[in-house]
Image (tube, rainbow, N blue to C red):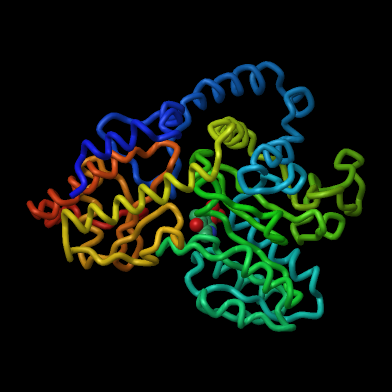
Amino acid sequence: MLTREECLDLDQSDPLAGHRKLFHLPDGVIYLDGNSLGALPRTIPDRLESFVRDEWGTDLIRSWNINGWFDSPNRVGARLAPIVGAEPDEVIVCDNLSVNIFKMLAAAIGLRPDRRTIVIETGNFPSDHYITDSVAATFGLEVRTVDAAEVTNAVDDDVAVVHLSHVDYRTGELLDMPAITAATRAAGAISMWDLAHSAGALEVELSSSGVDFAVGCGYKYLNGGPGAPAFIYANRRHHGDLRQPLTGWTGHAAPFALDRSYEPGPGLTPLRSGTPAMLSMVAFEEALRCFDGVDFAMVRAKSRRLGELFVELVDQFLPGQFELVGPADSARRGSQVSFQHADGYPIMQALIARGVIGDFRAPDRLRFGFAPLYVRHVDVWDAVDTIASVLATREWDDPRFRERSTVT
Ligand SMILES: *Cc1c(COP(=O)(O)O)cnc(C)c1O
């Protein structure tokens, strides 16, 4: 039997414990949803205030030059690069994830003009599926949808691009990026990884894995705030050949020459479309400071321990009441744990009412994310204790907890 004191001891010896104070976390809340919306870094309100007052308010349009607004997609990309194992010139921050999926699938198809198939994994996120279907329809390709275990077998010489999520948003399953990327490359196809549920939570080694393209969002484990700009990684070997259909003026080689015809800029510049959303960009840039000097081997070790602890305690407090979804081995899981329960929705609403915030994914999954920079071992203990109490008292079985909100 694991005790609460033992969890407090684990926090005492946690080398990442000091990072928690970089975040604003409300009293009385155990936040296990940083995989959906990261917590607020403490310095963001002041940074946004000075941005609005001094840069927008005082420097006005001069800010595009003097405050580095125009170059921000590349600068923030360079700041993000080490978090995903990339070189500084291989990452750019722009648009949202869904838009970037469209742009990069189209770019991949452009690199393999003789191939007519896109491979996608069954469990990928809806936006990834919808946009893959739309890209296929737009450019006249076929979509081949396969289970994770079948991906490498499905890549033949007709496949232009293989589009996968590094960590499955529902089950938490972590795919073997180096192995799948190597097999994809051996078959001559482009690999495109969606890092929405891995960037900031575990070691991602894009360059050394030989990945072609990757995309991800800024508001999950990267804590960039609601609707934060997303990012794109493109391996250096493709720089110079990158073409995507949303050829806006900021991707032009000389945007202020105001030429009538499009001339792609160098490196990742052609992946830009329009003006960066600076209020969001500045918050994201500030948020990334929380990762300065962070050792991702440590982040991963803590993330695995938190997940294992959660599973162990659920088993200890609630034997047989929840079914674990996804891999039981933490080495094959991202930084989240999902459980299946027929009354998952009202149970999660009752937990949220008690200050334990996770989320629900249809049809019956309770999802708990463990952001290693601010979740403590004792939070895991207290969360499971609350789950046990909510189930024992059946307080979830109240009509108000069954009313479905738009966002679950
Ligand atoms: C969160 C998430 C998205 C969301 O895309 P947005 O454009 O940011 O709304 C897409 N794909 C995956 C895999 C996700 O986890």
Q: Farthest residue toward the left?
A: 393
**Where is residue 185 drawn, in percent x and y?**
73, 71
**Where is residue 133 drawn, in percent x and y?**
60, 74
Q: Residue at x 67, y 37 (%)?
A: 79
Q: Residue at x 12, y 57 (%)?
A: 397
Left or right, 247 with reference to 290: right
Q: Nearer the viewer, residue 292 or 268?
A: 292
Query: Relative to 172, does residue 13 appear above or below in the rendering?
Result: above
Q: Residue at x 53, y 45 (%)?
A: 297
User: Which image quadrant for residue 158?
Assistant: bottom right
Left or right, 28 with reference to 178: left
Left or right, 380 with reference to 218: left
Q: Nearer the viewer, residue 330 or 347?
A: 330
**Where is residue 125 drawn, in percent x and y?**
49, 64
Query: Relative to 254, does residue 54 appear above or below in the rendering?
Result: above
Q: Residue at x 79, y 44 (%)?
A: 250
Query: Relative to 70, does residue 384 appear above or below in the rendering?
Result: below
User: Which image quadrant for residue 191?
Assistant: bottom right
Left or right, 343 with reference to 106: left
**Where is residue 134 drawn, in percent x and y?**
62, 71
Q: How many marks?
A: 0
Query: Relative to 147, does residue 217 appear above or below in the rendering?
Result: above
**Quarter of the C terminus within the rendering:** bottom left
Q: Nearer the viewer, residue 205 or 14?
A: 14
